[in-house]
Amino acid sequence: MINISDREDIFKRLSLLRKDENPKFGKMSAQHMVEHLILVVRISDEKEPHPLYYNEQKAAAIKNYTIHTEKEIIEGFRAPMLPPDPVVLKEPSLDAAIEKLKSELADFDAYFTSHPNATPTNPTMGPLTYNEWLIFHSKHFNHHFKQFNLLG
């Protein structure tokens, strides 16, 4: 399992990602995947806040499954804020997207250093604490690293 706090490991794995790598599942390109991770990190430090897209009961069930079990995010899960097809890329290259991800993760760390009691809203699970975001990001990165053969 990816540990979101082990940035050296994360970026070592991402350095192996090829721009033309075909995903094992889903429609994203390699760069789309990295830019998707950027978006979710930006949601977690309230740079791009999103509302809760589900009712509280469904959100609680997803949170329990994702945060309070050892289970992985299932293949095929699509967050409700995402369109069915990949969006237009924002960064000029995969390498630029990876550099942007490094910067966004540093901002995530700084945000919670300055706001230790913040609970930014996860669009599928509702408000999460810093530790819950760490668990979610670890599982989310793991999910997408599997998608592009970046594990093991």
Image: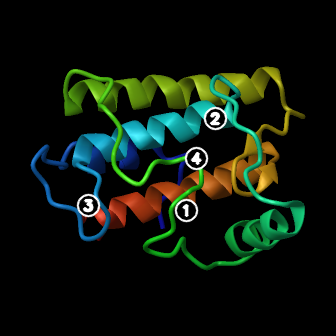
Q: Which residue is mark 1?
A: 139
Residue mark closest to the camera, 2 vs 4: 4
Density class for disc 4 (Cα within 10 Å; few <14, some 14-19, many ≥20) is few
Determine whether the residue tagged by mark 2 lies in a helix, strand or loop: helix
Q: Quadrant of residue 71?
A: bottom right
Where 129 sits versus 43, above or below?
Answer: below
Residue type pointed to by label 4:
Met
Q: Residue at x 80, y 48 (%)?
A: 128
First in sequence: mark 2 vs mark 1:
2
In the image shown, does 7 or 74 lie closer to the viewer?
74
Residue type pointed to by label 1:
Lys
Q: Position of residue 41 (x, y in %)?
A: 56, 37
Residue type pointed to by label 2:
Ile
Q: Quadrant of residue 89?
A: top left
Tell me whether the residue at label 3 lies in contact with that at label 1, contact meaning CB atoms closer than 8 angstroms: no
Q: Which residue is mark 2?
A: 43
Q: Which residue is mark 3?
A: 148
Q: Which residue is mark 4?
A: 81
First in sequence: mark 1 vs mark 4:
4
